[in-house]
Image (tube, grey):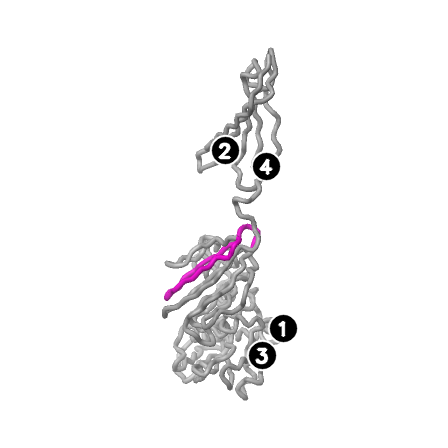
């Protein structure tokens, strides 16, 4: 590909033979815009051209610049290949929804091909995503995933995919996972590292997170096991634009590979409930910014409230001493589920005397846990009233 400087940016779709010029217009020298044009050169069409686009966006041609209507055509089924990657409103290949009067010049107006500011030519059905479409910050996770599937499919063909949350083996090192933004670790189950942010456990009552930021940060807010996160964004103050370049992004759908909804001008969405057990907050800011969100665990079982599940007690052993009352017997049960230990042993004094009857007994319970290679026993002794008659 051979870069050439033009007023606007453009590229032919797919390999045409020989070198291919890549036009980069004045004001278009950002990573996202250049990635968009490289995407075309690699064979990618605009995201809103996908056959299933009507499930995600509405096209309002009445607001389109005359003569540009062809840019909003939908590709027929069978003419494109999605490589198993879902539609992503945050794709760098997606058109913007609109522009405002401050951005209604040059290449920026062509992001939405609208002839009037604040008119939505490409309008997400879920309007929370209006400021997400038109991303020109950087390629999304799904953009890179599609490129790797198209051009590097054989690199890790013999590698077992242990990556979770729609991550996949990195073609440059098949022993590592490429994870959706916000997630990391060996199998994409950890929170991506940042110098700010962190893990938050939601409780049954509303809690609040208020933060001022001028960097990239990641938070994960988790519900109790079996529950979901109920949340509401209550304050947003970032560099405001129709398509956010600095923002808080909230991923709350079950599919973590697609871009979440991005907010930079004002709170939106009302009270929402996560589709899975957690939500991810991704914050990108250069200028001093802030946000506030309240959250709670919608259902789920708090670990301390969980009911332990045990197997049935085994049979009592023989008495340890021939005298009966001076000895003890024991029995055993296993922990099947919950926060209980590996197993538990119950001890009781023998209930028979040679010359009398014991109408109570001492009870000893031993909990056994595993700490690495060390087995530790915790002994709890309960003394029952002991009545002996002769």
The residues bearing labels 1 and 2 have C-alpha atoms spaced at a distance of: 61 Å
Spot occupied by residue 106 in the image (x, y as percentages of width and height) = 43, 84
Q: Earlier in the sequence, mark 2 or mark 3?
A: 3
Question: Which residue occupies the foreground of this view, 366 or 267?
Answer: 267
Q: Residue furthest bottom?
A: 66
- Front of the two marks 1 and 2: 2
Which residue corresponds to mark 3?
59
> Between disc 1 and disc 3, whose residue precedes?
3
Q: Which residue is mark 2?
A: 368
Distance in Å between CA atoms under marks 1 and 3: 18 Å
- The residue beneath circle 4 is 310
The span from disc 4 to disc 3 (Cα, nearest Å) is: 58 Å
Distance of mark 2 from mark 3, alpha carbons?
Answer: 64 Å
Q: Is residue 305 above or below residue 195?
A: above
- Could you tell me which secondary element the residue under label 3 belongs to? strand
Q: Quadrant of the N terminus?
A: bottom left
Foreground: disc 1 or disc 3: 3
- In the rendered structure, which segment of residues is drawn in magenta? 204-227
Task: State the mark number for residue 16.
Answer: none
Mark 4 and mark 3 lie on one chain; the one further toward the N terminus is: 3
Residues at discs 4 and 3 in contact (Cβ within 8 Å): no
Q: Which residue is mark 1?
A: 77
């Amino acid at each position: 590909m051979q870069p050439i400087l033009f007023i606007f940016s453009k590229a032919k779709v797919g390999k045409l033979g020989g070198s291919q010029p890549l036009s980069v217009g004045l004001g278009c020298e950002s990573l996202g815009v250049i990635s968009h044009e490289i995407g075309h050169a690699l064979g990618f069409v605009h995201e809103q051209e996908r056959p299933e686009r009507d499930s995600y966006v509405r096209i309002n041609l009445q607001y389109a610049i005359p003569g540009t209507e062809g840019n909003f055509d939908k590709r027929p089924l069978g003419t494109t290949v999605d490589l198993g990657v879902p539609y992503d409103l945050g794709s760098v290949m997606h058109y913007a929804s609109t522009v405002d009067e401050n951005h209604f010049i040059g290449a920026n107006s062509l992001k939405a091909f609208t002839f009037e500011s604040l008119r939505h030519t490409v309008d997400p059905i879920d309007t929370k995503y209006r400021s997400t479409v038109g991303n020109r910050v950087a390629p999304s996770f799904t953009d890179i995933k599609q490129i790797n599937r198209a051009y590097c499919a054989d690199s890790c063909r013999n590698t077992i995919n242990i990556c979770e949350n729609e991550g996949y083996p990195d073609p440059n090192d098949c022993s590592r996972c490429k994870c959706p933004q916000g997630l990391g670790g060996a199998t994409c189950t950890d929170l991506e590292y940042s110098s700010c942010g962190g893990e938050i456990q939601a409780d049954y009552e509303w809690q609040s997170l208020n933060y001022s930021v001028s960097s990239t940060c990641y938070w994960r807010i988790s519900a109790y096991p079996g529950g979901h996160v109920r949340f509401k964004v209550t304050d947003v103050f970032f560099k405001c634009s129709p398509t956010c370049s600095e923002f808080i992004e909230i991923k709350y759908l079950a599919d973590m590979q697609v871009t979440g909804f991005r907010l930079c001008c004002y709170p939106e969405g009302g009270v929402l409930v996560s589709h899975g057990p957690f939500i991810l907050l991704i914050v990108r800011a250069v200028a001093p910014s802030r946000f506030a969100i309240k959250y709670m665990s919608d259902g789920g079982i708090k670990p301390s409230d969980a009911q332990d599940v045990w197997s049935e007690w085994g049979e009592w052993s023989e008495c340890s001493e021939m005298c009966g009352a001076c000895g003890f017997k024991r029995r055993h049960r296993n922990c099947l589920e919950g926060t209980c230990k590996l197993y538990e042993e119950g001890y009781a004094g023998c209930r028979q005397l040679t010359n009398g009857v014991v109408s109570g007994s001492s009870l000893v319970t031993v909990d056994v846990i595993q700490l690495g290679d060390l087995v530790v026993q915790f002994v709890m002794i309960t003394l029952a009233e002991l009545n002996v008659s002769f």
